[in-house]
Structures are given as C-alpha cells and as structure tokens.
C-alpha cells in the first residue's frame, strides 16, 4: 500500500517542475516567431501555445484543462456574463478605440466572421498556455497555482492601453480561479474569445455609451483613458 501511494507522489513533482520550466521556454519561442498578421498569429500561437503544451502534457499522461463538463459550461457562461460589461464600457474609451481592432477588419459579416473565428483561436492558445499549462495543469500544488502567471501575463500587455494593462493581472487571477474551480480552461477560453470578438465589433461601430459619460464615471482612475 505504501509503495502504491508513493508512486503518484514520485511522478507528480517532476511534472510540476517540468511544466514550470516549459513555461518560459514556450514563451521564449513565441517571442522569436514574429507574426505580422492575424493569420500568422493564429499559426504561430497554435504551434507554440497549443501543440507544444498539449504534446508535453500527453507524454506525461496529464491534461491541461482541455475538458468539458457541466461545471465548466456553467462557469463559462457565468464568467462571460461577468466580463461582458467591462468590454462594453471599455469599448467606449478613446485609448481603447484608438488601439483596437489590432488587426484591420471591416464590420461586414463576410469579413468579420473569419476574423472572429481567428480571435477565438488566439484566445484558446492564450488560455491553453496561461490557464492550462501554468494553472490547471499544475493544480496539484493547490490554489496557489492561480498566482503563477499574473505578472508575466501583465507584462505581455505592457504595450496596450494603460487601463488594459492595469486590469490584466487581476483578470489573469480571476480567469485562473474560475478555471481552477472548473478543472477546465473552457471558462476562460469562452470569456476571453467572446470578449475579444465583442470588443472589436463594438469598436467598429458607434459607442453604445457616450464616451464623455464613461470618462466621467472613470475620472477617479489615475490613468489616461
């Protein structure tokens, strides 16, 4: 009995170590592969942030959150509903409207739908890496796995509008906590992908809220909006 109990412990520690070592390696590879267009970004992110983590996890007999059940679906719906107002309000801010869409697209359905699909792939890749490999994939260390990636995630947003940079760390923790609860990256993937598509769609149209009203609401923030 003691031998059987010790075997999982013997294998779990190397996997956690390897996953945490793989994280910086994957990030480094991603930064070496330039992606000047959304199409190129989809190819790069699929190879670097999806295929590599999934392959390494499979070799170790681990899952990194690619699973769906009732809890994951419920958490995905709740998380998406929670973040939607942030994207709606954010889409009215001048700094956000100047920055997005990151890749040129028109609101014509025939052009926007492929754009939306590619944004979801980018979101899936991001969540596979940050919330999959670095959170759900090492959940045996406990809830503290939620706090592995926020600083790196925030640094990845350092060139984006200040309000987005400020929210990126807390967003990483929130997404990680929900995925940890669901033992799945479905919630963060759906919320992230939905948010990216919603934001681009809103920015391509007239603001749903008067920007002056939004700026007045957020005037207490010490950030350029």
Image (tube, grey):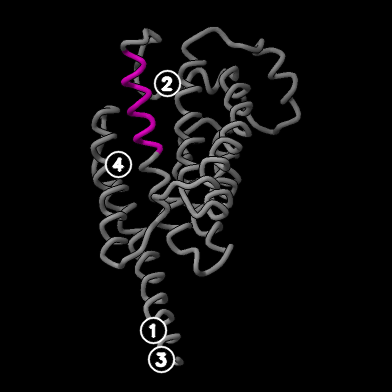
Q: What whole-number distance in Å separates the C-alpha atoms at marks 1 and 3? A: 6 Å
N-terminal of the pair, mark 2 or mark 4, is 4
Q: CA gap, disc 2 to disc 4? A: 18 Å
Mark nearest the camera among 2 and 4 is 4
Which quarter shows the C terminus?
top right
Q: Nearer the viewer, residue 203 or 156?
A: 203
Which of 192/214 is in front? Answer: 192
The segment highlighted magenta reads 111-123
**Is the residue under label 2 in contact with that under label 3 (CB below 8 Å)?**
no
Q: Residue furthest bottom?
A: 2
Q: Mark 4 — residue? A: 45
Determine contact: label 1, label 3, CB under 8 Å: yes
Which callout, 4 or 1, points at the residue further toward the start of the chain?
A: 1
Instruction: Say above or below: 66 vs 23.
Output: above
The location of residue 42, given as percent across then percent down, is 28, 34
- Residue shown at 41%/75% (left/top)? 12
Give the residue pinned by disc 2.
101
Q: Is residue 39 left or right of residue 121?
A: left
Mark 2 or mark 1: name the one nearer the start of the chain. Answer: 1
Residue matched to label 3: 3
The relative height of residue 194 versus residue 11 in the rendered view (above or below) is: above
Please identify the dominant SS of the magenta region.
helix
């Amino acid at each position: 009995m003691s031998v059987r109990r010790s075997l999982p412990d013997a294998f779990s520690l190397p996997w956690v170590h390897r996953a945490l070592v793989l994280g910086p390696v994957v990030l480094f590879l991603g930064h070496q592969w330039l992606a000047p267009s959304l199409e190129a970004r989809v190819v790069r992110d699929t190879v670097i942030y999806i295929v590599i983590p999934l392959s390494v996890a499979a070799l170790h007999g681990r899952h990194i959150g690619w699973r769906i059940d009732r809890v994951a679906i419920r958490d995905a719906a709740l998380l998406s509903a929670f973040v939607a107002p942030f994207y709606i309000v954010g889409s009215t801010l001048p700094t956000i409207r100047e920055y997005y869409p990151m890749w040129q697209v028109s609101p014509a359905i025939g052009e926007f739908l492929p754009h939306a699909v590619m944004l979801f792939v980018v979101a899936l890749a991001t969540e596979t890496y940050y919330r999959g490999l670095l959170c759900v994939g090492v959940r045996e260390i406990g809830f503290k796995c939620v706090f592995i990636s926020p600083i790196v995630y925030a640094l990845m947003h350092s060139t984006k509008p200040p309000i987005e940079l400020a929210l990126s760390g807390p967003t990483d923790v929130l997404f990680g906590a929900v995925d940890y609860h669901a033992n799945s990256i479905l919630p963060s993937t759906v919320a992230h992908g939905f948010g990216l598509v919603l934001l681009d769609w809103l920015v391509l149209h007239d603001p749903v809220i008067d920007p002056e009203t939004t700026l007045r609401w957020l005037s207490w923030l010490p950030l350029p909006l």
